[in-house]
Amino acid sequence: MSTKVLFVCLGNICRSPTAHGVFEKLVADAGLQDSIQIDSAGTGDWHIGRAPDERTLQAASKRGYDLSNLRARQVTSADFQNFDYVLAMDKSNLKDLRAMTGDKTNCHVSLFLDFAESSWKREVPDPYYGGEDGFETVLELAEDGARGLLATIRSSGR
Ligand code: 4NP
């Protein structure tokens, strides 16, 4: 049985696609692509069907991640049945997810950076209205969170 992970931000064009691509590469490099399934989604609906933000694509590409095939979609209530982990980029995303689930879910819903091992940050800051360095920060935090998440999934033996 595979473990299913969904990364969630607001627009699904900056932070969650970055986490998606970073985690996907880490999982593939570990040879675990058949046992871990990955997706990403937004709490908002503005960018449905669109590729990630150009600045996200550029910053990711510089570090060896190709996010160009990803397309934005919105979180649905079925996601809480289909995924084992639904991981929010910030507290506002988490609040929106909790409003959708109430207490009626068996899946793990938390902040993505709860799994980070190096950073003291708990939230991935929204880079949308900022400069290029914000996109670098998203990548650094995503790499940290992805490593910790993979370690947790491996140690849970799923
Ligand atoms: P994301 O960034 O949640 O990391 O994808 C944003 C993308 C778009 C908007 C806000 C945040 N927006 O307001 O359109």
Image (cartoon, rainbow, N blue to C red):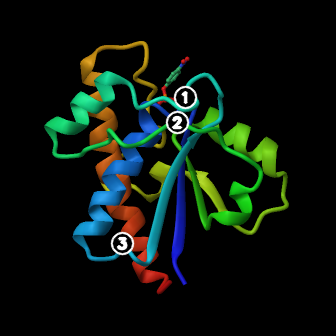
Of badges 1 and 2, nearer the viewer stands 2
Residue 121 visible in this rendered orientation of the protein: no
Which residue is at the front of the view, 60 or 131? 60
State the CA–CA distance, disc 3 to disc 1. 26 Å
Q: Secondary structure at mark 1?
A: loop
Q: Quadrant of residue 57?
A: top left
Q: Which mark is residue 133?
A: none
Regarding residue 86, the answer to whether it shows in the image is yes
Residue at the spot x=51%, y=40% of the render? 89
The numbered disc on residue 33 is 3
Q: CA distance from mark 3 to mark 2?
A: 21 Å
Q: Is residue 114 left or right of residue 98?
A: left
Residue drawn at x 60%, y 53% as measured from the top left? 110
> Pointer 2: what residue?
72
What's the residue type where badge 1 is placed? Gly
* Res 30 quadrant in image: bottom left
Disc 1 vs disc 2: Cβ atoms closer than 8 Å?
yes
Which image quarter is the N terminus in? bottom right
Q: Secondary structure at mark 3?
A: loop
User: Percent x, y for residue 149?
Assistant: 42, 64
Q: Which circle's residue, 3 or 2, is located before the other in the chain?
A: 3
Compare marks 1 and 2 and give the one earlier in the sequence. Answer: 1
Q: Residue at point 29% right, 40% down?
A: 139
At which x and y percent is residue 132?
25, 19
Look at the numbered discs 3 and 1 and tell me whether their residues touch, using CB distance below 8 Å: no
Give the residue type that dot 3 points to.
Answer: Gln
Q: Which mark is residue 11?
A: 1
Q: Please determine whether, in this image, residue 34 is positioned above or below residue 112.
A: below
Q: Is residue 81 above or below residue 78?
A: below
